[in-house]
């Protein structure tokens, strides 16, 4: 047992993967991954989507059996035949989607499956639970509270506490901050640092390199199923990590807009939802890319959903190209699409795409009239259309008939964008267009957004990642608790001002 | 241009129900040869094949409608009751057109009776879809309610007895040996085949079909893509009801009377046929031809069991297990896809 370990590299790794390979039919998902994880360290696993991160994690959690290669724990060979053997070996996974029972209390969740009973009655293990929460520095979470009343961030802590109580030594976190606000993220990082101090090893998977810079000690870069680089985070720059990930020099992540803006094509006024947003409006010009920044709970997604008629709207109007203003309370996606609006959902998996349908069916779904006549599909034309978009956007797939679920995140997003392009609306609302996708695809999507704007489309980009907004937008607005800041040219905003408005609702520290 | 597979219908999954059909047939042939060799001849006779095919008509037509509903992510538990109600409506409409002494019914009367039965199903289906969409009640619950409502309505308008009619041509639609002989199969069988083609074409080659798959695969995506979700859901249940109405006419033809107590628990046979045929209760998958194969398997089971002299109650137990088994396979498939 390792006690009181410093953050220095240990001579012997706690977990060692040697030349792991795994193929699914002809697809080689992993072709030789080696990974040394040391106790008391946070080990970042980075790589583009499709690089093999999730397959590797499935090997580690016992869901997949590797074809070649060995796993060693404490120098002993380890066979991970199934998920429970991984758990017994002390490997705990914290998934993106939390796996807690909402109706049970914090304590019941933490001890689920580890109950001690006497004469058939469950004995309280509140001591152990409190100890775990204490260790994580989150004594503020009451063991008796029901999990459903906790925020996502706190539920995550409960999951981590469960890992501690079950004596896990290696905690794997898959994109743990994807749905957290800045504040919650910092709280999670404190928890991770506590785990590190306890001598546990944390494998941290994230797309956010700035996070890795902040929290991780070591890193391993995966590319095309191989580990292509590793080292200490402190000794490398974000730029060098990006280069290793994509295997080429990335000159300019964000293409700068150069075209002129046209006349105003859309004016939204006083949009009020239930309960967010509160009386928000904006103007959008031809060729404009308007960025909307906000933290989780700021109401930016709600704004988009109100505009597209997906959420209940209390008030608000939308004036398009000088036509009579539409009342947003009776807008519906059917009409919105007809009015040349389109929405890219932030949630690809549950809303954006029908995962079991083919790439083709997903692309043509919103504009099925273009490839049908009198209710009959023109399948040949559909195939041609799908093949064209797959080719144009570089969707990596075996054919357009493949179900979308078989694609990586970046490629799925390209399919969702292809649907927008095929429908060809004038006003595009893109909600987190690069969420959960790799750096290479991100760059391609930024360029796509640019091309669209240059063709005269008006684009509203919503994001919680500020660098991309300041990178690609003409104008920027910030939201805070359902209200928005003024809309200004992006160059006139400083990062500090944006964050201040997003966290306080004020642009300047002293005034108002 | 390479041809792309159509949604939910690659040829392998299409073939599977037929392999199942051949397997069940082979199994029963072996069992009967082993235990009831005297019955083997009649089991393998063309007469029995015709009986099985004719008896598949009622469940088969219902399964075609149910395929659309299940593929779109819904369910219709009122199918059996709808068949009974439609058969009663059919018989009563025929009686309204009975003319002369001894009474006869003309072609016009039979057409009107058929349309009335279809309309009854359509209205019931629209009710199912509408209530489920507008009151936001899961279709499982709504159609469970309709199961009682439609059954009660059938008993009510039939005054709790069979509705007898003067003999007419409609009654010959389910005769095993049709007249003229060159038809080989009963008119009901041919009607089923025509309906199968219509439903299969609808699901593969029309916008409606695409929307059925899209709704079942992910309703949120469908909404986002501008599919008028409510309208299409109601339409799908209405079409299912219409097909159940035709099923009701076949039920009338089979019994030569409108029977409010017929087709009890038939919805289970119908749902089982769809699931055996490759439909998924979680939506997004379903194949009309597979469902017909599934319906044939169900009839074959009943026929095989009676040839084996398996008592009626055991048949029920076997069918119950088969339904659970089919759903278990479906769940397993869905889980495997998800991972």
Image (spheres, helix red, strand yellow):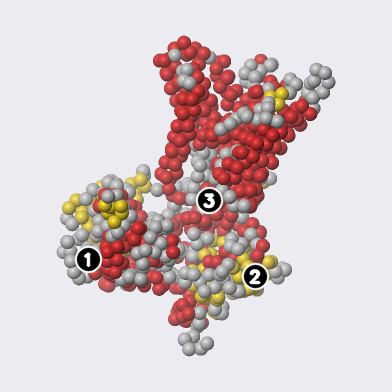
Question: Label 1, on which residue?
Answer: A199
Q: Position of residue B124 (x, y in %)?
A: 66, 40
Viewer-proximal residue among A360 and A452? A360
Question: Label 2, on which residue?
Answer: A316
Q: Mark 3 vs mark 2: tell me if same chain.
A: no
Chain for disc number 3 = B
Viewer-proximal residue among A5 and A238? A5
Q: Secondary structure at mark 3?
A: loop
Q: Mark 1 vs mark 3: tell me if same chain.
A: no
Location of residue B164 with respect to A9 vertically, above or below = above
Q: Is residue B206 something that shows in the picture?
A: no
Q: Are marks 2 and 1 in contact (CB under 8 Å)?
A: no
Q: In percent of the image, x 46 and y 64: which residue is there? A: A434
Q: Secondary structure at mark 1?
A: loop
Q: In percent of the image, x 59 and y 45: which residue is there? A: B142
Q: Is residue B227 left or right of residue A10?
A: right
Chain for disc number 2 = A
Location of residue A359 with respect to A49 vertically, above or below = above
């Amino acid at each position: 047992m390792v006690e009181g370990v410093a953050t220095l590299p240990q001579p012997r790794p706690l977990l060692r993967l040697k030349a792991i390979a795994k193929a699914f039919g002809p697809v080689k998902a992993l072709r030789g991954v080696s990974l040394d994880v040391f106790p008391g360290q946070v080990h970042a696993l980075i790589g583009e989507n499709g690089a093999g991160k999730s397959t590797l994690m499935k090997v580690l959690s016992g869901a997949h059996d590797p074809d070649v290669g060995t796993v060693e724990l404490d120098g002993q060979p380890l066979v991970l035949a199934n998920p429970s053997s991984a758990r017994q070996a002390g490997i705990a996974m914290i998934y993106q989607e939390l796996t807690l029972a909402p109706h049970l209390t914090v304590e019941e969740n933490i001890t689920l499956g580890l109950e001690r009973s006497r004469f058939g009655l469950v004995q309280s293990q509140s001591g152990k639970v409190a100890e775990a929460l204490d260790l994580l520095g989150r004594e503020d979470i009451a063991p008796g509270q029901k999990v459903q009343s906790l925020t996502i961030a706190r539920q995550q802590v409960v999951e981590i506490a469960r890992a501690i109580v079950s004596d896990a030594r290696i905690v794997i976190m898959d994109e743990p901050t994807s749905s957290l606000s800045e504040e919650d993220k910092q709280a999670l990082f404190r928890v991770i640092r506590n785990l590190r101090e306890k001598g546990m090893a944390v494998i941290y998977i994230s797309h956010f390199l700035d996070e890795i810079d902040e929290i991780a000690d070591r890193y391993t870069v995966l590319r095309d199923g191989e580990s292509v680089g590793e080292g200490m985070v402190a000794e490398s720059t974000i730029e060098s990590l990006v280069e290793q990930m994509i295997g080429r020099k990335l000159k300019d992540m964000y293409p700068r807009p150069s075209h002129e803006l046209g006349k105003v094509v859309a004016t939204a006024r006083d949009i009020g939802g239930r309960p967010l947003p509160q009386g928000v409006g904006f103007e959008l010009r031809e060729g404009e890319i308007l960025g909307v920044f906000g933290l989780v709970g700021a109401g930016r997604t709600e704004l988009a959903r109100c505009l597209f008629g997906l959420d209940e709207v209390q008030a608000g109007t939308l004036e398009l190209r000088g036509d009579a203003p539409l009342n947003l309370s009776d807008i519906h996606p059917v009409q919105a699409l007809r009015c040349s609006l389109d929405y890219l959902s932030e949630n690809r998996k549950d809303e954006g795409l029908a995962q079991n349908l083919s790439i083709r069916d997903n692309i043509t779904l919103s504009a099925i009239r273009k490839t049908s006549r009198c209710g009959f599909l023109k399948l040949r034309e559909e195939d041609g259309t799908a093949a064209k978009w797959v080719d144009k956007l570089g969707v990596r797939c075996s054919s357009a008939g493949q179900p979308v679920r078989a694609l990586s995140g970046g490629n799925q997003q390209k399919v969702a964008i292809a649907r927008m392009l095929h429908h060809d609306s004038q006003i595009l609302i893109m909600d987190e267009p690069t969420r959960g996708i790799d750096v290479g695809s991100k760059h391609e999507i930024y360029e796509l957004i640019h091309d669209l704007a240059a063709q005269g489309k008006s684009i509203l980009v919503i994001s919680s990642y500020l660098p991309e907004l300041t990178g690609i937008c003409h104008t920027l607005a910030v939201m805070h608790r359902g209200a928005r800041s003024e809309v200004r040219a992006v160059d006139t905003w400083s990062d500090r001002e944006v964050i201040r408005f997003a966290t306080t609702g004020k642009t300047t520290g002293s005034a108002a | 241009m390479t041809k792309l597979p159509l949604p939910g219908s690659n040829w392998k999954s299409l073939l599977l129900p037929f392999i199942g059909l051949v397997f069940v047939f082979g199994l029963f042939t072996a069992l009967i040869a082993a235990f009831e060799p005297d019955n083997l001849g009649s089991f393998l006779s063309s007469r029995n094949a015709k009986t099985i095919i004719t008896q598949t008509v009622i469940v088969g037509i219902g399964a075609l409608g149910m395929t659309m509903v299940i593929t779109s992510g819904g369910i219709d538990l009122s199918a059996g009751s709808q068949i009974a109600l439609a058969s009663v409506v059919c018989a009563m409409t025929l009686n309204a057109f009975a003319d002369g002494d001894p009474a006869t019914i003309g072609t016009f009367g039979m057409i009107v009776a058929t349309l009335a039965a279809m309309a009854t199903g359509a209205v019931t289906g629209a009710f199912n879809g509408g209530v489920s969409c507008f009151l936001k009640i899961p279709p499982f619950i709504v159609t469970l309610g309709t199961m009682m409502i439609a059954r009660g309505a059938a008993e009510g308008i039939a005054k709790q007895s069979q509705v007898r009619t003067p003999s007419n041509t409609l009654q010959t639609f389910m005769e095993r040996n049709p007249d003229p002989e060159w038809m080989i199969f009963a008119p009901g069988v041919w009607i089923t085949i025509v309906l199968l083609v219509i439903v299969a074409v609808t699901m593969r080659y029309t916008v409606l079909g695409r929307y059925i798959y899209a709704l079942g695969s992910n309703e949120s995506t469908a909404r986002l893509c501008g599919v008028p979700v409510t309208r299409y859901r109601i339409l799908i249940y209405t079409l299912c009801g219409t097909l159940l109405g035709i099923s009701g006419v076949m039920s009338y033809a089979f019994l030569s009377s409108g029977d409010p107590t017929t087709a009890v628990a038939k919805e289970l046979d119908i749902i089982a046929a769809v699931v055996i045929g490759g439909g998924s209760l979680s939506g997004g998958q379903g194949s009309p031809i597979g469902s017909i194969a599934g319906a044939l398997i169900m009839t074959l089971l009943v026929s095989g069991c009676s040839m084996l002299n398996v008592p009626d109650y055991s048949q029920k137990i076997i069918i119950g297990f088969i339904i659970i088994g089919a759903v278990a396979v479906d769940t397993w498939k869905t889980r495997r896809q998800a991972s």
